[in-house]
Amino acid sequence: MANSARRDSPELPDFSLLKRLARDQLIYLLEQLPGKKDLFIEADLMSPLDRIANVSTLKQHEVDKLYKVEYKPVISTSDQLCFLIRPRIQTVKWICDVANADRAAGKFRRYKIIFTPQKFYACEAVLEEQGMFGDVTTDEWAFYLLPLDDDIISLELPEFFRDNFLAGDQRWVRTAGSALHLLHSLYGPFSKVYGIGRCSKMAYESWREQVEEGEQKARHAEIGNVFLIDRDVDFVTPLCSQVVYEGLVDDIFRIKCGCVEFGPDVTSSDKSLKVMLNSQDKVFNEIRNEHFSNVFGFLSQKARNLQTAYDKRRGMDIKQMKTFVSEELKGLKQEHRLLSLHIGASESIMKKKTKQDFQELLKTEHSLLEGFEIRECISYIEEHINRQVSMIESLRLLCLLSITENGLLPKDFRSLKAQYLQSYGVDHLLTFSNLRQLGLLVEQQPGETLTVMESKVGKLVNDKTAGKLTDAFSSLAKKSNFRALSRKLNLVPKSDEEYDLRVPRDMAYIFSGAYVPLSCKLIEQVLERDGWAGLEEVTRLLNGHEFAVTGSNGADLRAKNDAQRIILVMFLGGCTFSEISALRFLGREKGYKFIVVTTAITNSSRLLESLLDNHV
Amino acid sequence: MTKSKADEEDYWNSSKFKAFTFDDEDDEFSRLKESRQAVNSIRRLVEEDDDEDDVEKVSWSGEPVGSISWSVKETAASNQRTDREPAFPKITTDTPSLSKSQSGYSLSSLFKGKTKGGNFQTFTDTLSDSSVRLYAPELRKPKSEYKDYVSDWSPEETIQRLQQGKTASLEKFRSLQDKLLLLDFAVSAHDGNVITAVLIYLKRTLSKEVLFRELESRQTALRHFIHYLTETKDQRLLLELLRALGRTEDMALLQYKEHLAIADENKRRDFLKSCLSLPFSAEDSAHVQDHYTLLERQIIIEATDRQAERGGKVEIFQKFPRRASILNMPLVTTLYYCCFYHYTEPEGTYSSPLNIRQTFKISEKQYFVTALAARAKLKAWLDVDALFTSRNWLGFTRKKSPLSFQRVVDILQKNSAPTQVLQDYVGLVDDADLRISLAQKHKCHDIVINTYRDMKDRQLLLAYRGKVGRGSAEERKIDELLNNQQIRWKN
């Protein structure tokens, strides 16, 4: 049932090299610290670390005990403490506290911080302020890229989104550039780079500078083209409910670093089970990109086949049985295990979704995307809020309403906000302020206000240093213009046409045929046109920042090389599994192979949770 | 596979010592070598290693000298670099203030005033001279003088070095012009890490007034500074900054946010009270007022109810012990709580649902939904019924709801209402199709049967017969209908 790949699809490069590199560099860093040491690992680094090394690797390099960073006093007795952390001020402060406590107790130890993927000056400034600079030494582990699957590479930096888009802090721009640089040196040279978004542009610049700093050896390119895209170019897609299997599993069970934990309701035992979800899982690989409505049929077909295979045993003689056991049984058992797991997961998904009237929810989302019966949608959202159904879900619908409608009418905005605060707590005033700043949930601005503001800000800026029209201003101007975009790019297929989800005709299938993801549509269009020509109106609606550049060694390589059909898409600020599925579909249709590089895998809950501010 | 995975997971949490295995050592080793080669093929990664090696080089006197010779190599490399054709073109970014070519110009003009050597070229020369001298002790200059040489980078070079993670002293940038140049170069390099590094330096060496003034026209730098202050929890300076910028609403919200860190409810209430005078927008001001009023009331209710619960005399608390305190819960939760425990109280009390509804201007629909859920939870079907009942001027009662009956059924069903109760409300759903599907879902057979009868749809009724229990009252009813000669079936 999975679409057969076009025969001429190129092979993907081998990304396991990235893991080896990261591991060897870690080993090198550990070797720099001779003697026994205890290793403290930041909680969100544990899973990524697990993917590239194991305990025995660490043990072999004299790591004695492993601890999770928990911001509590340390009980270790080792005289060398090593901290493997993200460059966060809070964590460095804690390490200083640990060292200061030791100092006060007259305990002598050596401390080493290994920042990954890089250190920040602000962290070192903390060491200096706390009088620990030099006593605590630092190092960097350039672990930029974690391959999650054959075609997915993650930077595992979920904070990228909030830092960059909400706070306007560009600390991760160079990181993104470095990650690109690493890929370029291993799998490049790239011949074309396309992109859209402020951050993409900056990351491109950073990468380009790093290329110029280093030297590029002539080598056989494995990746030809690159597409960079900012998450804020398209907020609609990640806010929609996912209905493709992998996305749905992520929405419900939360896939973490390529691994999911299925609870007792799925495993039908009393234990939870952690399972890796990637192309190695043959069952999963066949259903991951399927619309959920097809999954059951597929799984039961598969179960029948399995039964037949098992049944072959009957009537076998001893010799045949022996071959069967040694050659087939193991595979069958494996398949059986996977099958029952995914059947369990599907059942659990069904149960949860029917309980909360998933159909109606989807209907509302589709109406919003279509711009149809908006009043009904608003009262649906209102009821959602009144009944205190999931706080995130209500917020998601509000944001979707705001983006698709280009802001809420002042009257609606006020009433919905008030009801939201009544249902989920006044603390969410802070969340609303964040959402407004990001342009996710806003009041409709009367046309004039905006222009007045523009000229005011513009004047202010011109009077001072060179014209820097920046963030505060661009967030004001960040009108989604979703409807116009949707018309221009044909994102919402006509609803009266039948859509056969088993035989998808376009990327809209990932949203039940109701919507083609904007992000993926842009990629499709730009690749088709080999640039932005003809998309002027679209880029204007998206606030510009688009680019398409050709490398000096690019032109002659074109056409003959398979690498030209391997396209690396880098999402700055995260991408969803649904988008990955859509790109896989596009690749099959057009004979491309997409490699998705993302700062993190996201979905509507993660995206909105990162913007909540109702806690300390 | 999964098992060993799980074992390791366990390991992360406990820290028990575990013997390590040598099983795959050979294999690992060869792979190590292999990937080491791969590592070496990437220049950037190796570059750092080289640096370290150089740093550890030691001269005759035991002084580390690597940094100098290495920095010379660096400068030489950067000179070559400019000749090479770029592999990829530069694209104009939206902050075009300081382009490379411009900066080259400002660079030399900066140097004219400051360095002894004159232009850039001779600067490099003197530097390479000094590195030669390193190995001739008698000619060595005092260490302090090197530092001067080495750190004599232009603002742009300094930013570049910082970007590459190298050390560079900022101390020599003392004039405001230099400091701002540094900041602007950092901003145009789009490297937040470096922008913050410069800001930390400016914070230390400029007065607040000057810094704030300059940041006002530098939005990107300003946002970095705000984020830095947020992360270092420098609340006071942050508030001052926002005040200076005239961003009063942000200031108010920031101060309001502090309440989240106050655990004690009385202190929190007092803090919220002090927030009332903050310059919120009119709309938010009302919300904060509500927040304060609500907490004040929750404290009173909590105290009374805790006592009542402990006293053991109030039946409802015995029957349905409270699962959590009501403190700091949202308004709707509080309303639910009061509908659950204090439904019949007169309007004068703090915990009366009607009083809460009035005080906080809760919409009719909201009140209705909440009361319905609470009373249904208690299986107080009479209360439920009363919620819908209104009398018209003739004194007839009829059921009315601000909520669609479909939703009402949903709420009741989620609170496990029995079929008899459900069917009253399923029957009130206007739309026939919807009514049937709801009735089927909730097994309200009578409604299905009656609707089919009204539709005169014999086929559907016949089909439904298969779905009800054998020999049940429903089956009998269907049979009666099917045998009824008076009905004119349409099929």
Image (cartoon, rainbow, N blue to C red):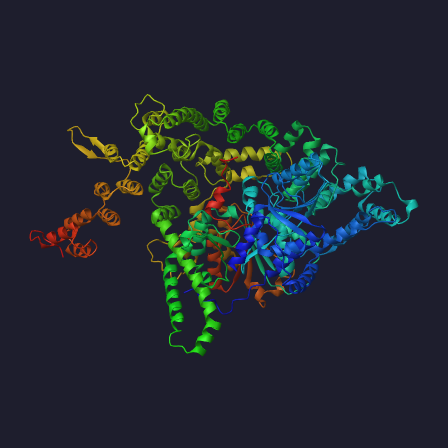
Left or right: A121, with B341 as reference point: right
- Along the line of sight, which residue is nearer the eye, A163 or B106? A163
Residue at the limit of the structure toward the top, as seen here? B348
Compared to residue A51, the image places residue B427 above or below, namely above
Left or right: A234, with B41 as reference point: left
Left or right: A199, with B83 as reference point: left
Classify residue B80 by image quadrant: bottom right
Classify residue A409 by image quadrant: top left
Which quadrant holds the N terminus of chain A? Answer: bottom left
Expressed as whole percent of the image width and height from the top left, the position of residue A566 reads 55, 62
**Does the rendering let one see residue A183?**
yes
- Along the line of sight, which residue is nearer the eye, B246 or A479? B246
Residue at the limit of the structure toward the right, as seen here? B138
Expressed as whole percent of the image width and height from the top left, the position of residue B157 reads 73, 44
**Does the rendering let one see residue B97?**
no
Tell me how many marks there are.
0
- Along the line of sight, which residue is nearer the eye, A483 or B11? B11
Compared to residue B231, the image places residue A545 above or below, namely below
Expressed as whole percent of the image width and height from the top left, the position of residue A169 reads 59, 41
Expressed as whole percent of the image width and height from the top left, the position of residue B322 reads 38, 33
Compared to residue A445, the image places residue B485 above or below, namely below
- Along the line of sight, which residue is nearer the eye, B33 or B402? B33
Residue at the limit of the structure toward the left, as seen here? B485
Residue at the image point whose x is 38% and y is 27% from the top: B310
